[in-house]
Amino acid sequence: MPKTTKKKQKKAEDFKKVKLKVGKKVGPAANATDTSFTAKSIVMGGQSIMADKSAAVTNSRNMTLKELVGRLRHYSAPVRKEAVGGLGDLVGMHPALLRTDLGAIIEGSVRLVVDNEPAVRRALLRLYTSMLRTVAERDLAPFAPLMVVFTCSGMTHILEDIRSDAVRFLDLLADVAPAAVAQHSATILRNFFGLLETQAAGDGSSGTARTALLSQGTRLGIMQSCHNYLAVYTRPALATGDALWFMGADAPLPPPAAEFLYADAAAPFAALGLFGEPSAAPTEAAAVRAQSTEALARLFPFLLATWMEASTVFAANALAADRSLDLCALVLQILQTLWRTAHADAVPPAARDLVGFLRRCMVHFPLGDGYAGSAQAEEALLAMNIRVCELAALVQLGHVGAGEAGAKAAAAADADADAADAARWARRAGRYVLQTMGLRARKAKDGGEASSDASGALLAQEAAPNAHLSPDAFAQLLAALWRLALGADQASAARLLAGATLYARACPLASASKALGIRFVARAVEMHWARVPVHGALNLAPLHGVVADWALALPKLLWQLRDRNAPATAAAASALRLVCQRTRLLDAAAVAALQASLVPLFCVAVPAKGVVFGPFRAYAPAQQRAVLEAIASCPARPARLAAAVRACTVDAAAADARVRVLAAEILGA
């Protein structure tokens, strides 16, 4: 018979008795009812298109700022791009949001600087370009640290396209908020060092550039951004607002009642430390110079490698169509900014890097000689050659200023050979400067070059100036010329400054460079012939004849200018006042001739027409006062000149009050 053990066990399980134990919870009964329950709800999201936004600020798609900022964090790149475009639409329709909600807009969108989608980054760059340029710098300053943080994060990103776009964002920030961005120079410069500097190999072999794998266009963009930022953060050390910054600031005219009084200052001699005063704290300019010295040392290997690679374009008969010329131009621009800041007055012989770089530049100097092509390329070549001339002048000044002590200290480095090379380079640069201004040496009858006379007038006065020289290029050219003259011998310095004087006279009346040429000569006159000379580095005595002729021609120049060139008229009137009031340039006979030539400036008597007034009445009051102050400072006034002044200023209603006072002083009223 089959065993029934299993059946009995199953039957016993159905009626199993639960044994109770102490400390153990009694389970529910078998017939207990479970009363627990769960509830779920369905949430229907409201549709924004159906919401009432009549009182809210919306864009053309009826979206508010809050909704757009929320979409900037969407996982879909097209949605983020559309949200950026919606922000631009919203700001365009409601410009007042830039005053009330600028923080929400920037804080919500700035994270897209490092977005992985290129289309989103480009859309954000377009938005910032159109939006931030309409916001005042003081309003952007509180948000500049946040924008710099994300921009620097993008500059160190692993992806090349994000790094390139971050550099473009930095260009925009440096343009719209330069002062705020300059405060983060330590972080930003460190990022540029990482992008551009040369990384030395670990085994001591020759280094390889980190940018070797970058495309030429990307490298060019990074270098351009670096130059833009260097120009921003070095502004406290370089920017003076004066095109003649290299000659020192203009000495202001003292007030008539306080000619011999010191300036109103609490401690005018505190900077001298005569009484043990604590030295002043380092200025902002000193900190910038220290950073520039470090930047020059860090970036120079990369800049030199780039120059060696791209300068081969000058060895060819025609300039290549690639970007080598742009790379060479940027190398010189970056180096010029750094050497002007780190070595303001001269490049010392110990700065072997810059001396070696100049040696490589002079191999091809003048750069692109004889090139005739696009106007843009010719302008770039001119700017590059002028920068090379300035570097040659600074190197020469460094060797001149080093003296015998410097020569002994650098004997192991062939200081004599370097000094000879520096002098030779400076002579070549000086010839290029004069040729660029359109001046040439006077030829003797036998065909040779005429020898320089005592006045230094070696140059032909009838030479036509270069009509294609822009005002900016002329200002850079004058900076190089002045520094070349400071380091040259007396004959070479006289030749250079005579050329600048002749160019100032021959420059067309309507030229934008006319005023700068007049101011340059007037500043040089003030430095040497002032009653209290302010500069003794240059001996301009050999130029006395050339400069005196220039001064005697000022009345004729004022008559010719009339109202054609207001800046040149103001510069000529100020120069006339300077010559008569503050210098010993002209003797008594020359002053009398100058006064006689001033008469037509006021009026002349023509038999057929009567009294014909000159351009004096058409001048602005400031120019009128400058001319009358020049006449008032002369020891004697001819009767003919006094009568002309009386005829021009007799109409009290047509003359300025101060002009009438000066006229009364001249007439002895």
Image (cartoon, rainbow, N blue to C red):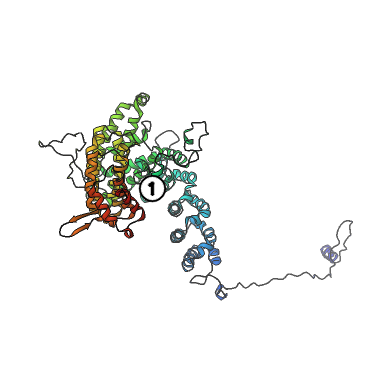
Instruction: Report the front residue among 435 and 511.
Output: 511
Q: Please, is residue 178 above or below residue 299 in the view?
A: below
Q: Residue furthest front?
A: 669
Secondary structure found at label 1: loop
Residue 136 in view of the camera:
yes
- Relative to 450, does residue 120 appear above or below in the rendering? below
- Residue depicted at x 47% and y 65%: 88
Crowding at label 1, few (<14), some or many (≥20) Cα neighbours within 10 Å? Answer: few
**Side (left or right) of 168 relative to 47:** left
- Residue 481, position in %: x, y? 28, 40
Instruction: Compare residues 96 and 303 and report the one nearer the observer.
Output: 96
Quarter of the picture containing the N terminus is bottom right
Q: Residue 607 versus residue 21: which sits nearer the camera? A: 607
Residue at the spot of label 1: 241
Could you say which quadrant of the image residue 122 lies in? bottom left
> Vertical placement of 294 versus 60: above or below?
above
Residue 65, given in percent of the width and then of the height, sits at 54, 66
Q: Residue 414: x and y, percent?
A: 32, 26
> How far across and down, in percent of the image, does residue 345 sit?
37, 36
Q: Is residue 359 visible?
A: no
Give the total number of marks visible in the rendering. 1
Q: Nearer the viewer, residue 330 or 279?
A: 279
Left or right relative to 79: residue 20 = right
Q: Amino acid at mark 1?
A: Gly
